């Protein structure tokens, strides 16, 4: 059954339509792959019975001629998405054995279109992290290893389980979320494609909140076309989310493969940061050459406030997190540690339930929102955020998209940066600007470093112009012809 798990989503859907195999057979192959890959710790909860039941129902619908766009496709779900009757923890102890009585809009859209749920995927606790080491369930191990090495590498974060599962062929695609790079950076680290759509393109209803003005759901997939297929099903206006945009969802897969001749692509000069590895710079230049060869015009642009993006992000995101996470008090659901009185119960519950990184960000957030520092930090960060958005607006008057590296390095070893929060935060240097401005971004695998590890290129587009990004990403993908796969060791 191994060959079934190595199919792309599109190839699997075509095979199902041609009755070459059933949804039950396809799902069984993935269930077995997931069971055999527990060393990666990509799934925090496997749901084989549910998956096979959904697959059988899918086969019945197809037999009746009522197949949906994703009919029979086995997917993984990041554990930040609430799934009805299935434990949802956000990678934290504080939610305990929480089983939602409702389904997130994004996953409901996927099941509506016929997809099958294989289980819940590991992630950094409350999506706070860049290496998937803050999870209460332990770190995810990347399926990739350096050439000749056996050190355990990070798959990136916070959507590390999603990226590792797609790269290791443990699902045909996965849901993920991106608050500061949590879809694109893991995609770059694992040789997969990750899309962070425009803020408001996908509903946030039923997704455990980290930073509400930055969080956005998106897919991680094997290739650009698969990502487009998934996003088409995930997206859509939702009246239950006040930030959901009342716009039509385009036919994203139709944009993949379109000519990009005549498109103007900007290269931001501020993204050439000090100490950036030569191979990242070289890959960026190669990306420029590929797009030129495809008929694009390359223009240097300036995003002058980029240097303030990371500090602004690490004020805005923790501020919103400290507010959002105030609801976890042990009173209504999740973990509860009894104390002598109400205050002690709150304190004991939160002390036991939250991990170190989450506590750090809650404290930072509470500090920047406090009376004496609100103006000096939070208000100033919001002003910087506005300037960053203005920079993009200015750039997009002259170009159709921007090309940058996705991450400042390839995947690093687990434990390598966990003692240095600042070094960890610097992983988001090329990605946070996109979240602060609410724009769409996509990471495409474009090469490998000297140790054979994947490297990604990022394309950034105008708000609600994911279509152009899919066309450009398709051109990059075709030129890069990235075929490297992790050698199976698990």
Image (spheres, grey):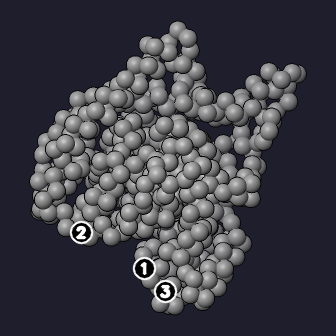
Q: Position of residue 174 (x, y in %)?
A: 51, 61
* Secondary-structure class at tag 3: helix
**Badge 3, how many Cα within 10 Å: few under 14, some, many 20+?**
some
The number of callouts visible is 3
Q: Distance between the residues labelled 1 and 2?
A: 20 Å
Q: Nearer the viewer, residue 474 or 119?
A: 474
Q: Nearer the viewer, residue 273 or 65?
A: 65
- Residue at 74% across / 54% down in the picture? 101
The mark that comes first in sequence, 2 or 3, is: 3
* Secondary-structure class at tag 1: helix
**Badge 1, how many Cα within 10 Å: few under 14, some, many 20+?**
some
Q: In this view, does 419 lie above or below 280?
A: above
Task: Residue under label 1, please give it.
Answer: 11
Task: Residue under label 2, please give it.
Answer: 258
The label shown at residue 17 is 3
Q: Position of residue 465 (x, y in %)?
A: 32, 54
Q: Where is residue 72 in the image (x, y as percent from the top left)?
A: 56, 77
Image-quadrant location for residue 293: bottom left
- Residue at 51% across / 73% down in the picture? 70
The mark that comes first in sequence, 1 or 3, is: 1
Do labels 2 and 3 touch, CB within 8 Å?
no
Q: Is residue 72 left or right of residue 467?
A: right
Q: How far apart are marks 2 and 3 (CA)?
A: 25 Å
Task: Name the image quarter holding the N terminus.
Answer: bottom right
The mark that comes first in sequence, 1 or 2, is: 1
């Amino acid at each position: 059954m191994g060959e079934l798990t190595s199919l792309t989503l599109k190839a699997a859907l075509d095979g199902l339509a041609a009755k070459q195999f059933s949804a039950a057979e396809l799902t069984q192959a993935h269930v077995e792959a997931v069971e055999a890959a527990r060393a990666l710790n990509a799934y925090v909860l496997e749901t084989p019975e549910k998956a096979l039941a959904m697959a059988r129902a899918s086969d019945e619908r197809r037999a009746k001629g009522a197949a949906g766009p994703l009919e029979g496709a086995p997917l993984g779900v990041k554990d930040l998405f609430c799934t009805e009757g299935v434990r949802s923890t956000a990678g934290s102890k504080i939610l305990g054995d929480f089983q939602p009585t409702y389904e997130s809009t994004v996953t409901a859209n996927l099941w509506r279109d016929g997809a099958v749920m294989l289980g819940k995927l590991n992630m950094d606790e409350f999506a706070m992290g860049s290496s998937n080491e803050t999870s209460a369930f332990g770190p995810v191990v990347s399926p990739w290893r350096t050439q000749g090495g056996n050190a355990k590498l990070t798959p990136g974060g916070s959507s590390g389980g999603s990226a590792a599962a797609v790269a290791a062929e443990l699902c045909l695609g996965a849901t993920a979320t991106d608050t500061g790079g949590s879809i694109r950076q893991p995609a770059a680290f694992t040789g997969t494609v990750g899309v962070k759509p425009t803020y408001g393109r996908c509903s946030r209803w039923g997704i455990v909140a980290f930073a509400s003005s930055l969080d956005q759901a998106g897919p991680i997939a094997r290739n650009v076309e698969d990502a487009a297929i998934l996003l088409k099903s995930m997206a859509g206006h939702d009246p239950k989310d006040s930030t959901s945009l009342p716009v039509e969802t385009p036919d994203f897969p139709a944009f993949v493969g379109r000519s990009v001749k005549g498109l103007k692509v900007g290269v931001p000069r501020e993204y050439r940061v000090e100490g950036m590895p030569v191979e990242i710079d070289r890959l960026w230049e190669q990306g420029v050459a590929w797009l030129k060869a495809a008929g694009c015009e390359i223009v240097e642009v300036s995003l002058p406030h980029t240097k303030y993006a990371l500090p602004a992000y690490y004020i805005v995101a923790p501020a919103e997190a400290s507010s959002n996470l105030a609801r976890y008090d042990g009173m209504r659901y999740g973990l509860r540690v009894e104390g002598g009185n109400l205050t002690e119960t709150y304190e004991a519950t939160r002390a036991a339930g939250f991990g170190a990184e989450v506590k750090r960000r809650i404290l930072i957030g509470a500090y920047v929102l406090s009376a004496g520092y609100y103006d000096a930090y939070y208000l100033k960060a919001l002003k910087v955020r506005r300037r960053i958005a203005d920079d993009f607006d200015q750039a997009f008057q002259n170009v159709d998209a921007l090309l940058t590296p996705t991450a400042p390095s390839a995947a690093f070893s687990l434990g390598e940066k966990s003692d240095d929060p600042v070094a960890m935060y610097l992983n988001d240097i090329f990605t946070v600007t996109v979240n602060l401005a609410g724009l769409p971004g996509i990471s495409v695998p474009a090469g490998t470093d000297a140790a054979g590890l994947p490297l990604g290129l990022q394309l950034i587009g105008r708000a609600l112009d994911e279509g152009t990004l899919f066309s450009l990403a398709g051109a990059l993908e075709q030129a890069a012809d990235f075929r490297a796969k992790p050698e199976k060791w698990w």
